Image (cartoon, rainbow, N blue to C red):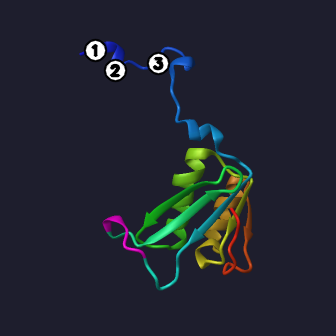
Amino acid sequence: MDKKLHALPENKTQQQTHPTLNRISRQAINFNTSTSSDRYPLQRGDRYPITMIDRQMKWPEAIPTDNITARNVAHTVYQHWIARYECPTIITTDKGRQFDTQIFSNLMKLMGIKKIALLHTTRKVTV
């Protein structure tokens, strides 16, 4: 077995990172969930996409989930965005009930994130 192939890098210059991880902005992120009756057939029975878009870099992500409870949405936001790209300074959400709960508010407070809920989500929002 080749030791070089399976060895950890000796210094930081040898480590490779995904190029997009360094470009993600900390300014503002849009979060939306699909709570309407038009559910999407996604993988493994997950029918609700949680979309996350970095406004400055226009970097989109859609995370499929099987339910959109407040606990699950807060966990998904933390696991798939905050843990990977750092805390944004502002999060803009739709008026979904899962964003207006104590669990989500505690996550925002703990991470020092300002949450803004859109009043009119029917208009097309420029990302």
Q: Are marks 1 and 2 in contact (CB under 8 Å)?
A: yes
Left or right of residue 27: residue 52: left
Tell me: 126 left or right of 80. Answer: right
Pick whichever, 49 or 125, lies toward us: 125
Cα gap from disc 1 to disc 2, whole angstroms: 7 Å
Tell me which corner region of the image, top left, top right, bottom left or bottom right, holds residue 31.
Answer: bottom right
Write the start and end of the magenta stretch as one range: 40-44
Tag 1: amino acid: Asp
Q: Secondary structure at mark 2?
A: helix
Neighbour tally class for label 3: few under 14, some 14-19, many 20 plus, Cα within 10 Å? few
Q: Mark 1 — residue?
A: 2
Position of 62 with respect to 59 (left or right) is left
Badge 2 amino acid:
His
Can you give x and y, in whole percent of width and height, for residue 112 in the image? 73, 54
Residue drawn 64% across the image and 71% down it: 102
* Disc 1, SS: loop
| Quadrant showing the N terminus | top left
State the CA–CA distance, disc 3 to disc 2. 9 Å
Say few, some or many: other residues with alpha carbon within 10 Å of mark 2 (under 14 / 14 to 19 / 20 or more): few
Q: Nearer the viewer, residue 107 or 43?
A: 43
- How far from the left and from the top, in percent, is residue 21? 58, 40
For disc 2, the marked residue is 6
Mark sitting earlier along the chain (3/1):
1
Q: Tell whether position 43 is magenta.
A: yes
List x then y, in percent, for residue 66: 40, 70
Q: In the image, what residue occupies the spot 66% across and 78% down?
A: 95
- Residue position marked by numbered label 3 in the rendering: 9
Q: Is residue 42 above or below residue 110?
A: below
Q: Could you tell me which secondary element the residue under label 3 belongs to?
A: loop
Q: Which mark is residue 54?
A: none
